[in-house]
Image (tube, coloured by chain):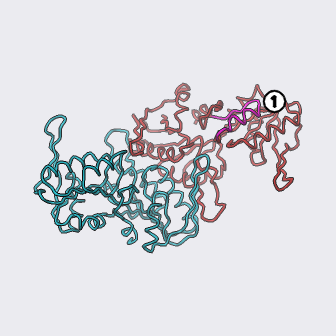
Chain colours: A red, B cyan
């Protein structure tokens, strides 16, 4: 049985259409700003679905309030599906006195939830901070299916070596070649990017990353691919954490931009709902 | 050693002026809305001070992020002083499917904090949800000191029987009489209020409650006291969770309205900082 939080509202119709049973919830705000939640009905096993995009902290606290209500109503096994996990990029201490914020959020959810499911976590190793069962789901199948026809016999590139496993996962589903861009500092202010060990000329290319924010790297990569003779250039990411104007800027630079619906955006055309229903 | 969160910023100068040692913190927001915190310096024992007024959820998550940073830096004993505790009025299940939201927040803070100090919690029994040491501090001394001269040989009233212990605590510090209002339903739409077993005529009266929101009850009580011949009417509360326009409306109806600074408002003239420094 599913319970959908405010950060999962955009997935609800599809969850129902694909046969997911959903308990009704009432979520409102008191005049002083406090949230009020109520879950109508109960079940032994419940999966709460809510991403934690902005307003992140409200979505996090709501996950805890919903869980308290569900435990109160007798739920035995409580799973959280948090497709986009806030604070996932604050995954290490880089200066003394910083928190590992993603750990703080995972430990908070663990007060109530037995299991945690996320999509394409920025640093999958941080799942160790969740003491229960914690699973990092891949959107590779969804992204591959979406771009299969458009890409034809093209290739898949990661914007940097760190994202290579993402490009590989998508490429393997499509039986295509994959590689990554290499960044080389050529002057104090200039970084040169180029794809490693692949010939892009005459090929359709899909660039895949986990998060797009400003889109700057994607635009630079796309422009470079065109200069190198690439045919069509597509950009995909799991999480569209777009800065203002980023969708327009990236869209202008490429043939198509598409992200998954872990976060609702105008280009969240790749659905991860089938993956949620398989859990 | 103190660390001051965003919900305690308004107390910082006074904490320092009264000799409290405060570690510097850096708190900012990333463009995507995530908070970033950093504590400069550390100590073996740290007391984090932050109320959780609106935006409540941000203040709650920040308490967790600060605590993660402090634990990371080696703090052994971590205390939270949360003068105004959000969700404190959501203290019981009134309809099936509701959470006990105050429990959810207390259990969340308990992930990191050993001890919790709050002021005048709406339902002090809910402190049992915090597994560590949990203390409900009284603002009675601060309120009594503030109104001592103005009140003279007046009396102290609670707006209802449930708040009587608050009126008593203030009255006892001043050596004055105290009582409470009684509400009687006289028609389906009308409730009559009157003070029980006291003669207010010619007396200064202080009405004391824990929270003022709309101020409706206070205004009704003040008007009634004037009709009954009371001299000056003062209103005090611990937490000024004022709805829009409430400060103006209450101020117009009484001789003085003052609340403590658990929440910063234009009438938060009663300081609980000395009580924090005594911990």
Q: Is residue A245 magenta?
A: yes
Residue B258 image offset from top left, x and y in percent? 31, 58
- Indicate left or right for B104 with B221 as reference: right
> Is A194 or B229 nearer to us in this picture?
B229
Q: Quadrant of the C terminus of chain A?
A: top right
Give the magenta-colored segment's residue range.
A244-260
Circle 1 sits in a helix, a strand or a loop, which is it? loop
Residue B69: x percent and y percent? Answer: 56, 62
Q: Residue at x 19, y 48 (%)?
A: B223
The quarter of the picture where residue A164 lies is: top right
Vertical side of A136 occupied by B276: above or below:
below
Q: Nearer the viewer, residue B5 or A23?
A: B5
Quadrant for residue A267, please give it: top right
Res. A176 image quadrant: top right
Name which residue lies at 44% across and 38% down. Answer: A44
Does the stretch in magenta take in B80? no
Q: Residue at x 56, y 41 (%)?
A: A51
From the viewer's side, name the closer residue of A18 and A212: A212
Q: Is residue A4 left or right of residue B276?
A: right
- Total labels: the figure holds 1
Q: Give the image location of residue B36, x and y in percent.
A: 58, 55
Residue on which disc 1 sits: A232
Task: Please give left or right for residue A166 compared with residue B206 in the image.
Answer: right
Q: Residue furthest bottom?
A: B19
Using a 10 Å C-alpha cutoff, classify the residue at mark 1 as few (fewer than 14 neighbours), some (14 to 19) or many (20 or more): some
Query: Residue B141's x, y, as percent?
Result: 28, 67
Q: Chain of mark 1?
A: A
Look at 74% across and 45% down and name the residue there.
A163
């Amino acid at each position: 049985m599913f319970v959908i939080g405010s950060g999962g509202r955009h997935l609800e119709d599809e969850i129902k259409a694909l046969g997911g049973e959903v308990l009704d919830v009432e979520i409102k705000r008191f005049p002083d700003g406090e949230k009020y939640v109520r879950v109508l009905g109960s079940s032994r096993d419940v999966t709460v679905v809510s991403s934690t995009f902005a307003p992140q902290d409200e979505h996090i606290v709501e996950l805890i309030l919903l869980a308290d209500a569900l435990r109160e109503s007798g739920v035995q096994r409580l799973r959280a599906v948090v497709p986009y996990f806030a604070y996932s990029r604050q995954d290490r201490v880089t200066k003394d006195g910083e928190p590992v914020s993603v750990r703080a959020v995972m430990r908070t959810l663990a007060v109530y939830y037995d299991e945690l499911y996320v999509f394409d976590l920025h640093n999958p190793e941080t799942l160790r901070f969740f003491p229960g069962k914690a699973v990092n789901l891949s959107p590779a199948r969804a992204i591959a299916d979406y771009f299969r026809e458009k890409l034809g016999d093209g290739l898949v590139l990661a914007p940097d070596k760190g994202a290579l496993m993402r490009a590989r996962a998508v490429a393997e589903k499509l039986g295509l070649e994959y590689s990554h861009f290499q960044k080389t500092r050529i002057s104090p202010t200039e970084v040169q990017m180029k794809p490693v060990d692949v010939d892009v000329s005459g090929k359709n290319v899909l660039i895949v990353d986990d998060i797009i924010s400003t889109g700057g790297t994607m635009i630079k990569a796309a422009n470079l691919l065109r200069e190198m003779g690439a045919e069509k250039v597509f950009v995909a990411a799991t999480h569209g954490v777009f800065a203002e104007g980023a969708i327009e800027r990236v869209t202008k630079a490429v043939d198509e931009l598409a992200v998954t619906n872990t976060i609702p955006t105008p280009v969240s055309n790749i659905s991860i709902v089938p993956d949620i229903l398989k859990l």
